[in-house]
Image (cartoon, rainbow, N blue to C red):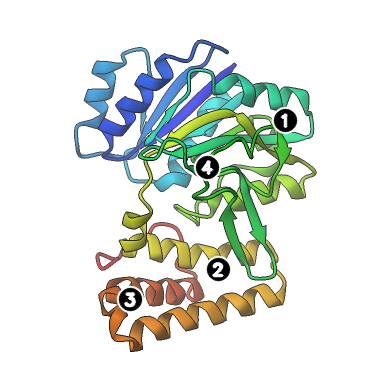
Amino acid sequence: MILILLVNWNGHEDTLACLRSLDAVQRPAFDVLVVDNASSDDSVARIREAFPAVEVLESGENLGFTGGNNLGLEYARQHGYEYVLLLNNDTEVAPDFLAPLVEALEADPQAAAAGPLIYYHALPQVVWSAGGAIDWKRGETRMIGLGERDEGQFDGPPRPVDFVTGCALLVRTRVLEEVGGLDERFFAYYEEVEWCLRMQHAGYRILFVPRSKIWHKISPERREASPRVHYYMTRNRLLFLHLGHAPLRARLWTTFSYARTLLSWSLKPRWRHKAPQRRAMWQAIRDYRRGRLGRCESTKV
């Protein structure tokens, strides 16, 4: 039994498009659960009207990516699902995307999670993620293949990676009994990297499955311009390095890189437009040092 889990927050148009793409998936059989994080855009009514067979679970508040998915993971555990696929609501999937992910986990009992080859929706042949890698020297993470045009360089059997993005992550439900769910102190960003690391520390592998393909409606330009994204990426990188017991050199490099960025954005005239992002980074660092984790309640970020 497979459950596909989508978290929605004021994004019914993306969610409906994602559900329409899932309608074309023929095998293996699966159920869909949408967790709605207290949307104010009539999402729940629209989803239920368009897809009456889809279960919609209302969280009652914005729990973020972590809390919303944890509600769904608990639902899956209670209802006896063997696998759960975390799937961003702003994705669209190939009709044959699901079977290769399940087959990869069934063929490798030591694999806890698997993820697909992910393209930019606006650039359908350009890769956003072919799995993820962690640089423990610099304390950095990166998407493998980011920005590369797919010319078959990622073809082949499933292979281990450091992590797969929570944008599309199939996990064995029984693994939750050993490692737990997503850490809600992250709220959003870096949570899946830490989760995959926890799985590996428990003796499991994380697989990238190139035969499985999806498309993500992500905009690097919008993310780069968002103070809120800068806040969570800054604070949560520090939290990830702490929880992952990163070596001292990784922490020192992170401190240096943050200081360099903040100085550049403060002193160089060409970065004056970065003032909102600079303030968000400063607040993120202060909040981490003060133990203010989870959802950022500031109206200035």
Which x, y percent locates residue 48?
28, 19
Residue 91 place in picture, x, y as percent = 41, 34
Q: Secondary structure at mark 1?
A: loop
Give the spatial CA distance, label 1 vs label 2: 34 Å
Query: How many residues crowd mark 3 within 10 Å: few (<14), some (14–19), many (20+)?
Result: some
Q: Can residue 82 be seen in this snapshot?
A: no
Q: Position of residue 172 (x, y in %)?
A: 66, 30
Q: Is residue 240 left or right of residue 48?
A: right
Dot 1 or dot 3: first in sequence order is: 1
- For marks 3 and 4, give the CA distance: 27 Å
Outermost residue on the left side: it is 41
> Of label 1 and label 4, which has the lower sequence position?
1
Q: Nearer the viewer, residue 188 or 139?
A: 139
Viewer-nearest of labels 1 and 3? 1
What SS does tag 3 mark? helix
- Residue, far front: 151
Mark 3 to mark 2 CA distance (whole Å): 17 Å
Residue that mark 2 sits on: 238
The residue carrying mark 4 is 166
Q: Going by the image, does 163 lie left or right of 281?
A: right
Residue at 48% across, 46% down: 66
Disc number at residue 279?
Answer: 3
Identify the residue at horizontal 64%, vertical 62% (top origin): 243
Residue 157 tag number: 1
Disc 1 marks a residue whose amino acid type is Pro
